Image (cartoon, rainbow, N blue to C red):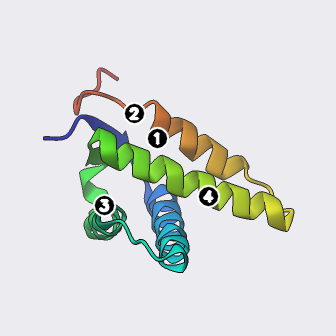
């Protein structure tokens, strides 16, 4: 059962995919790959945009947040702007608890 629902569009889905791939690469370089990260990457790839809301648990929320933070650090180290990543991190940190919204 999902604890939270993220209102996700194509840009967020692509950002999640890139961030989780980078996280898996970093984990493989350290020699310890977490199966939760692989499972989250598969879940994001299988997600259909027509559903509009990605159901996640608290553990998946933590995985996404860590992956996005690593991507943000990578962008800042290269001297690139991280405004888009920052806004997605905030959305992941405060997801909706209900699938149905009042607006």
Q: CA distance from mark 1 to mark 4?
A: 14 Å
- Residue projecting furthest to the top: 102
**Is 30 or 69 nearer to us in this picture?**
30
Q: CA distance from mark 1 to mark 2?
A: 6 Å
Q: Secondary structure at mark 1?
A: helix
Residue 98: quadrant of the picture: top left
Label 3 CA crowd tier, 10 Å (few <14, some 14–19, many 20+): few
Label 4 CA crowd tier, 10 Å (few <14, some 14–19, many 20+): some
Mark 3, residue position: 36
Total of numbered circles in the picture?
Answer: 4
Q: Residue at x 38, y 44 (%)?
A: 61
Label 2 CA crowd tier, 10 Å (few <14, some 14–19, many 20+): some
Res 14 label: none
Mark 1, residue position: 92
From the top left corner, tell me how far across and down residue 21 is, in percent: 48, 73
Horizontal placement of 82 versus 24: left or right?
A: right
From the top left corner, tell me how far across and down residue 96 is, in percent: 34, 29
Mark 2, residue position: 95
The reply to whether the C-beta atoms of the residues labelled 3 and 4 are less than 8 Å apart is no
Q: Please tell me which of labels 3 and 4 falls first in the chain.
A: 3
The reply to whether the C-beta atoms of the residues labelled 1 and 4 are less than 8 Å apart is no
The reply to whether the C-beta atoms of the residues labelled 1 and 2 are less than 8 Å apart is yes
Q: Is residue 61 above or below residue 71?
A: above
Res 70 label: 4
Q: Please tell me which of labels 3 and 1 falls first in the chain.
A: 3
> Which of the two discs, 3 and 1, sits closer to the camera?
3
Q: Please tell me which of labels 2 and 4 falls first in the chain.
A: 4
Q: CA distance from mark 2 to mark 4?
A: 20 Å
- Residue projecting furthest to the right: 79
């Amino acid at each position: 059962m999902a604890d939270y629902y993220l209102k996700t569009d194509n840009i967020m889905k692509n950002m999640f995919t890139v961030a989780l791939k980078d996280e898996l690469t970093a984990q493989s370089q350290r020699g310890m790959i977490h199966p939760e990260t692989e499972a989250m990457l598969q879940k994001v790839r299988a997600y259909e945009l027509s559903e509009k809301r990605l159901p996640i648990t608290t553990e998946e929320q933590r995985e996404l947040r860590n992956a996005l933070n690593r991507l943000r650090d990578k962008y800042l180290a290269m001297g690139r702007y991280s405004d888009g990543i920052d806004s997605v991190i905030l959305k992941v940190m405060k997801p909706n608890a209900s699938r149905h919204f009042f607006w």
